[in-house]
Amino acid sequence: MDKNITTPHGTVIIRQAKESDAQAYRELRLEALRSHPDAFSADYAVNEQRPMTFWAERMRSLGDENTMFFAVHEIDLIGMCGIFRGDSPKTRHSASIVSVHVKSGWRGLRIADELIATCIEWARQHEIKIVKLGVNAANASAIKCYERCGFTAYGTEPQAMYVHGTMYDELLMARSV
């Protein structure tokens, strides 16, 4: 399922995560949480304290029910996007997109679009019918990306996050597969 994309900065490979990515995943995730605290419900300080075994287990636990894709340039992880299937027989038809992030020097090249498209293709192969996500309602660039990828808003969760003294609503979006 690897996909090569050509960018002005060189070739980027979109590929599925593997256990050996644990350290690089930790670094990418912490960078995302540190630089964009209002984009994720996870907290930098909490995650920064997690032992390496936590990150290795996150990579080990990926499989048929959920996975993560990375955008890789040479040997560096420059982007990520996860997809997690519902775990009940009544929710297995749906999945959630999570942890979308592209490093700042790589933004504007549609790498997030490619990561999301790869997750949608994974969902299609796993007979998932609908994919959902939540995004900070103030994050206009992320919302535009999700709209380009076929997502539409279906609701808002008020005051979903409280970050540095500010409340943020979360826009709920979905698309059929």
Image (cartoon, rainbow, N blue to C red):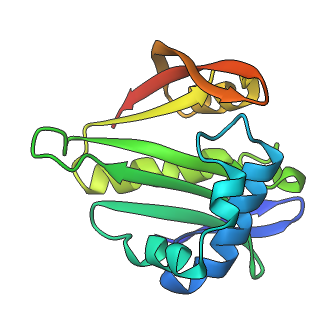
Residue that extends furthest to the left in the rendered view of this protein: 89
Residue 2 seen in render:
yes
* Residue closer to the observer: 53 or 113: 53
Q: Residue at x 27, y 66 (%)?
A: 64
Front-most of 163 and 85?
163
**Depth order, front residue of 90/40:** 40
Q: How many dots with numbers? A: 0
Does the rendering let one see residue 5? no
Q: Residue furthest bottom?
A: 20
Q: Position of residue 151 (x, y in %)?
A: 49, 27
Identify the residue shown where x is 49% and y is 55%. Answer: 82
The answer to whether 28 appears left or right of 133 in the picture is right
Relative to 91, 98 lies left or right? right
Relative to 84, say whether 148 is above or below: above
Q: Position of residue 172 (x, y in %)?
A: 48, 22
Quarter of the rendering containing residue 80: bottom right
Q: Quadrant of the C terminus?
A: top left
Judge whether 52 appears above or below 39 on screen. below
Asked if residue 77 is positioned above or below residue 176 in the image, the reply reads below
Q: Is residue 68 left or right of residue 132?
A: right
Task: Say which residue appears at 28% left-offset and 60% top-offset.
Answer: 65
Q: Horizontal and vertical percent for residue 122?
A: 37, 56
Residue located at (90% from left, 55% from top): 105
Please identify the quadrant where the N terminus is shown: bottom left
Which of the 4 quarters of the picture holds residue 167? top right
Q: Nearer the viewer, residue 108 or 41?
A: 41
